[in-house]
Amino acid sequence: MKPVAFDYVAATTVEEAVNALREPGAKVLAGGQSLVPLMNFRLSRPSRLVDINGVASMAHIEVRERELILGALVRHQQLVEDPEIRRSLPVLSRAAQHIGHWAIRTRGTLGGSVAHADPAAELPALLVALGATIAVVGPEGTRELTAEAFFEGFYTTALAPSELVTQVKLPLPQGAVGFKEVVRRPGDFALAGAYVERLGSGGAVTWFGFGDRPRRFSVREWPSDPEDRRHVWVELVRNVPVEERDQYKYELAVAVAEESYRDAGGEE
Amino acid sequence: MAQAMRPQMMGARVSRVEDPRLLSGQARYLDDIQVPGMLEIAFVRSPHAAADIIYMDLEAARQYPGVYAVLTYDECPVWLWDKATYEVGQPVLAHGEVQYVGQPVVAIVAEDRYVAEDAAELVRIDYRPRTPVLNMRDALHDQPHRVHAHTPNVFFHQEYQTPGFDEAFRQAPHHLSATFRTNRQTAVTIEPRGTAAMIDPASGRLTVYASTQSPHRMREDISRLLDIPEHLVRVVVPEVGGGFGMKANCYPEDIVVARVAQMLRRPVKWVSDRTESLLSDVHGRDDIHDVEVAFDADGRIIAIRDHLMADGGAYPAYPFSGAVGETSLAARVLTGPYDIPHLATVIDCTYSNKTPLGAYRGVWGPIASFIQEGVVDRVARYLGLDPAEVRRRNLIHDDQFPYRNAAGMIYDRGSYRESFEDALALIGYDEFRRQQAMDRQQGRYRGIGISVFVEPTAMASSEAGSVGYESCTIRIEPSGRVTAALGLGPTGQGHETTMAQLIADELGVNLEDIVILHGDTDSAPYGGGTGGSRSGPIGGGAALVAGRQMRERLIKYAAHLLEAGEEDIELGHGEAWVAGVPERSISIRTIAETAYTNVRRIPEGLPIGLEVTARYLPKRPVSFSNGTHVAEVEVDVRTGIVRVVRYAVVNDCGRLINPTIVEGQIQGGVAQGIGAVLLEALNYDENGQLVTTSLLDYLLPESTDVPQMIIQHRETPSDGEGGIKGMGEGSLIASPAAVANAISDALAPFDAFVDTLPVTPDMVLAMVQRKGA
Amino acid sequence: MADERSVVELTVNGRPYRVEVSPRWSLADVLRHRLGLTGTHVGCEQGVCGACTVWLDGEPVRSCLLFAVQAAGHEITTVEGITPAEGLSPLQEAFHRHHALQCGYCTPGMLLTAEALLRRNPAPDEATVREALTGNLCRCTGYQFIVDAVLSMRPSGGED
Ligand SMILES: Cc1cc2nc3c(=O)[nH]c(=O)nc-3n(C[C@H](O)[C@H](O)[C@H](O)COP(=O)(O)OP(=O)(O)OC[C@H]3O[C@@H](n4cnc5c(N)ncnc54)[C@H](O)[C@@H]3O)c2cc1C
Ligand code: FES
Ligand code: FES
């Protein structure tokens, strides 16, 4: 389990990084918590690694009135611990706490999680749930994509090979956002997870952990009776296609959605 | 001896002498061995479950810079084959065909592992794939075909039944049947396997460093298979990061590494990576049991019938097929702690195109307990009786010891009933039952599972080999310090501490003045190694016997030098003195000086120096430990997630050498049992690809998966040396049944029983849905 | 791809090193095989087992998922670095007293995670300790005595 040889470029600015990425076969190295395991298995074989850990301009945390702006290099553990984030968007800290283990979170980055686009990952789903925008820089300049448009499927995104995720803008939700996931062990990727936003009498549910990417569904009006809500979950979740062996996850999805709903309402 | 020394160290909670080096990062495990010029090996392994090898092109790999050699079967034509027992053996590098995914085919020797892996990718092999044999029940009938054309897939078949079985079974008022399945699991030591070898330039001897549990067996295997005279092979076992039976085998890689050192006359090393481990460490379990039970209206079990099937993989692991071990032993202890008069067993072990099956802690036990305890719970539920009560009605009575079970195994005395009642009290069984009814009404599904176990220990043969005895050499150095060497192969059990405790008591010296050597065939006396819970009772027995012989010698010296009668001499704290006259004393150090340097003063009839070697062969072929585990779980019936919330153990392994170490063994085994029930499975797809090749797929219990455990000891001494029984495996023998039964109990309102391990969330959901609450 | 080597300057346990490395060499391999610091262990090379845990600027990280070239300019601490010149550290002593290790292979990673936790939170409760240790697998101990050892480090001496 040793990676193939590559050359190594340590970038200190976004421009340097984008330039270095022009080389075919080049890949961004951020926290390395997804990329390096793949390289160790030789499933990923970049000929060049562009290490962006030294790009100081991508590590910012900025809390504005209506939104939270996070550089791509913000580490998961910062999401957990940063007092500003905990205050302005507690669901983000709580969700980040469920990513892997401590020593994974100290390295893993928001940008890496977004670019990696694991359908069971907590952060991409939260971006979809909140309607975040993702800023991307490439040889052709900068563009912004909605999270919904960014995540295309299993580990696939709208990112071009020489593009870099630089930052994420998360609108602070007006309603309450609940979070719940089912894991076999703490730190594992979720078997199923849900964010539920409650705003007025309606809101939205965003599922992850099954299907090819996080999916968000708006709900005009939440039924107050749990049994009726169950029907809503059952109806909605059928819109997420899953493989045969994951059929049982529909059950989990219903359970986590309901718990997430209650979580958003501050109920037990 | 006038006054028996009161043991002080035996039974004491002594902190381990091994710890400081392990805690400070100074211990040397296999991969820490680094000598100048050392090369590393990477293996090209079979990507197919079954295929003929049509063509190999090794040129590009041979030409790759940094590569020193590329070996195929032609360069290393050695077979791991116990010809007396099996029709089939495994070539250490594939010969014309491959029979499982991960089978070593080509060995690349290079300057380091990175380069070796680069070159491994350059090897081109054309295979003609065959339909793999993957299903045990089909394999039994040679379907879809034979794995090895010249011999049927069933490579071990045995039948047994007690006289009058049919009659007793037929006449019983009630019958139930069930099929139990335990999936493939494996030890997953956190330190992967590894081997290093080098030629000693002075003597020309081959030194093999191996992370193995059986140093002497490894030396024998290497000597025989590579045809090197045994005295020219030295096996050294460095620190070993866990074994659990998996490191008891001789593996193809061990032989290839030794061969490369011989061929290239360069030091060489191979260390498994995690994917290789999951593919090529012996697998364990993997069996199906079709069980029928006959019982009366009071829940007394009259007869059990079991068709035991185990998938042995592509080759019998060398020299010990796990399939044969798991089944033939299970068949002999299937009635567990219960007085069940009738038993009928049929065993079939089959070949398949999967990794060979070997030992994993508790061989046979986790499976047999799962069945025996599952049967009791099924009988209880069928009759509407409490499972604890049904156990009471079936447990062996104290006046029945020594008890001969239905398979003819003799159990020595234990605390079967006491440990059972104690364990129920520890967990608060009756209170739990009251609470459980209330919880259910609120949609909380909690369950309790009982597992009363027997643990055959110190057996004449085990996965560590068929050496029934253990050896201990004690040498008191001229300075009075003690060196003791044993043939054991510890992998974390703390033998350096426990063996020293035993010897300290015998010799009356301080623990710090004793060093225990093991794992080097040049210094350790010939022995069987560690496995099958033999080190405590047999290794400890050898230490006691050697200690006693040395003690007698010290007493002779002291009596002579102090001019007193032997019967009046006492030993302690490094001194010998005349009973009642402590000022008439002599230090062990002075005795040692006399024995080595002042030899004219040696008492008549005693040899020069202070050295004894003793071998201990227990009189009994086996000694049974026992105990009871009780697990409490909570099942989330909406998500299928199970949490073990409480756990109680009452354990009886005879006289305790060190209770803390025993508790550590129990806690570790319970964690493995929780893994076995909830998490761990080696899964193959329909093409025979192992799909669980990383630790994100093969899930081990984490710190949050294991609850606080309450542990209590009972001590029913064996009649062997020191009254010690073994205890390395009992915790993993008992725990899967306890946890599985607890889940079944929690799901009783759904009429469900756990019959397959592990129980994954989707399986729990299916059980819940089958019935609906 | 040419496997070109370059010299990096590393600071490990406060001591500076100059080593020639290939970019693809993991920090774990370089610590172990180039610097002779074999207390850092390797069990999966995938970030799961935690045996390779070291500190990067005081924070626990996986040294199997970090290339040695990336560690230049950072402070690396390994188990050798948290061991006093004489004897054992208080946490190591607690592991010893509580029998928190058997084969010892997971132990260095456990110690580094636990020590980092205690430096941030000197009085963690049991749930916090267990959560912090989820990223360190131990196959021998069943974790109980490890948790006990860590809890015993609290100023209250293990009592909640
Ligand atoms: C044991 C273990 C458990 C884990 N558990 C979880 C979990 O439960 N939930 C979870 O969400 N994650 C989990 N992870 C993954 C972890 O969250 C990773 O940190 C994350 O997925 C990737 O972030 P990274 O910074 O490490 O990215 P890297 O591994 O460095 O990169 C990942 C991919 O993204 C690309 N990339 C990285 N940054 C950028 C960028 N700024 N612009 C463009 N491309 C970029 C890389 O080229 C690469 O293709 C786990 C990892 C491990 C090892
Ligand atoms: S070796 Fe790094 S986490 Fe396992
Ligand atoms: S002590 Fe062996 S893995 Fe933890």
Image (cartoon, coloured by chain):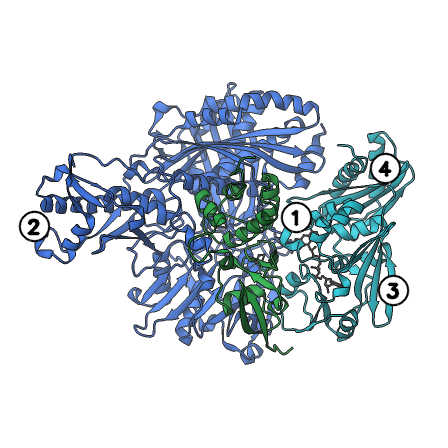
Chain colours: A cyan, B blue, C green
Q: Do labels 3 and 4 share a chain?
A: yes
Looking at the figure, which quarter contains the N terminus of chain B?
Answer: top left
Given the current orientation, which residue lies at the most extreme right position?
A: A220
Ligand 2, seen in the image, is in the quarter at: bottom right
Residue depicted at x 34% and y 51%: B528
Q: Nearer the viewer, mark 2 or mark 4?
A: 2
Crowding near the residue tagged with mark 4, few <14, some 14–19, many ≥20 C-alpha atoms within 10 Å: some
Q: Mark 3 lies on which chain?
A: A
Residue that carries the numbered disc 2 in the rendered image: B604
Q: Report the Cα–Cα distance between label 4 and label 1.
A: 29 Å
Chain ID, mark 2: B
Of the residues shown, which amino acid type is indicated by label 2?
A: Glu
Q: Which residue was labeled with disc 1?
A: A187
Tag 4 residue:
A232
Q: Name the residue under label 3.
A: A143
The kind of residue tagged 4 is Val
The reply to whether callout 4 and callout 1 are in contact (CB within 8 Å) is no
Q: Is mark 2 on a helix, strand or loop?
A: loop
CB of mark 3 near ligand 1 (< 8 Å):
no
